[in-house]
């Protein structure tokens, strides 16, 4: 058997950590002396320690690792690793996007341009009244997918036929990712039903954004700059029309969204 010090040296894990693992039941010593309280480990437990270290590198939680050691269930272990693999793939994709953005910003700096410069063509339109089938509630941005799922189930159950794109309307004066008054809907042809209402935004300025849904801030900024420069006031809740998106089986970089802000002259 190995003393806790010997086990620590071989496994490259501190004795403090080994005592903690013993305390929580993750890796208990093979033997504890009644007289001295010294901990002793089986050589075979080095393999368990290797597994613990590997799974910690995979960002598995200690309770998850404990379950793996307790059950020795290879199918469960494979499931956990696949989940972490998917999370890591998403994370790598996000980091690659950041690297690309850095390259683009460096190119702008070399051309003596502001890295926050964005090019949006701002237009105005008299947005004609439309009927929308909608659901309005306090929700977080993370709730969007679930909310749109309820919306789709609702208009199918109510026999409503969409006649235009899906949309979101932001009714709060400020923005809170965790809880915002948002109305999601879809343009419909009929006017029957408790969930169908008339949307009449009137004069709007708008711009078209191409790219992921989480990257609208620059477009909104350009619209607000245009409103101030042209002497307008905001007269209603801004809304987004999702022209092309997830339902079109395209990459997020190719999503097309029109962002509208109702306006009036000062």
Image (tube, helix red, strand yellow):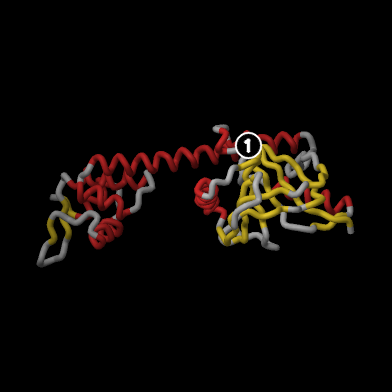
Residue in the image at 42% along x and 40% along y: 86
Residue in the image at 51% along x and 51% along y: 150
The percent position of residue 203, horizontal first and vertical second, equals 82, 50
The percent position of residue 1, horizontal first and vertical second, equals 12, 50
What quarter of the picture does the C terminus occupy?
bottom right
Q: Determine the residue located farthest toward the front in the rendered image.
A: 192
The percent position of residue 40, horizontal first and vertical second, equals 15, 55
Q: How many marks?
A: 1
Task: Report whether 14 appears left or right of 202.
Answer: left
Residue in the image at 77% along x and 47% along y: 128
Along the line of sight, which residue is nearer the eye, 78 or 239? 239
Along the line of sight, which residue is nearer the eye, 10 or 58? 58
Along the line of sight, which residue is nearer the eye, 123 or 69? 123
| Residue position marked by numbered label 1 in the rendering | 244
**Mark 1 Cα-neighbour bin, 10 Å: few <14, some 14–19, many ≥20:** some
Residue in the image at 71% along x and 48% along y: 130
Q: Secondary structure at mark 1?
A: strand
Along the line of sight, which residue is nearer the eye, 135 or 52? 135
The percent position of residue 184, horizontal first and vertical second, equals 61, 52
Task: Report whether 182 appears left or right of 208.
Answer: left
Above or below, 239 against 108 in this view is below
Above or below, 105 against 192 in this view is above
Instruction: Name the image quarter holding residue 80.
Output: top left
Instruction: Name the image quarter holding residue 189.
Output: top right
């Amino acid at each position: 058997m190995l003393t806790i010090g010997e086990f620590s040296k071989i496994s490259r894990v501190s004795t403090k950590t080994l005592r903690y693992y013993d305390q929580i039941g993750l890796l208990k010593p093979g033997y504890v002396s009644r007289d001295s309280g010294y901990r002793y480990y089986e050589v075979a437990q080095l393999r368990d320690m290797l597994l613990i270290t590997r799974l910690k590198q995979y960002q598995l939680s200690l309770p998850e690792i404990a379950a793996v050691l307790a059950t020795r269930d290879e199918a469960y272990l494979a499931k956990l690793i696949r989940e972490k693999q998917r999370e890591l793939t998403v994370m790598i994709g996000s980091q690659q996007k950041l690297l690309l953005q850095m390259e683009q910003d460096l190119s702008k700096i070399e051309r003596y341009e502001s890295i926050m410069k964005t090019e949006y063509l701002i237009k105005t339109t008299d947005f004609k009244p439309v009927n929308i089938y909608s659901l309005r509630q306090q929700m977080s941005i993370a709730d969007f997918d679930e909310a749109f799922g309820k919306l789709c189930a609702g208009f199918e159950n109510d026999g409503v036929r969409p006649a235009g794109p899906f949309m979101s309307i932001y009714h709060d004066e400020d923005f809170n990712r965790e809880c915002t008054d948002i109305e999601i809907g879809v343009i419909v042809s009929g006017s029957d039903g408790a969930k169908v209402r008339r949307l009449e935004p009137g004069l709007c300025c708008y711009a078209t954004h191409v790219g992921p849904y989480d990257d609208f801030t620059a477009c909104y900024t350009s619209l607000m700059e245009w409103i101030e420069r042209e002497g307008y006031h905001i007269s209603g809740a801004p809304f987004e029309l999702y022209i092309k998106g997830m339902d079109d089986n395209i990459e997020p970089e190719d999503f097309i969204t029109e962002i509208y802000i109702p306006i009036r002259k000062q």
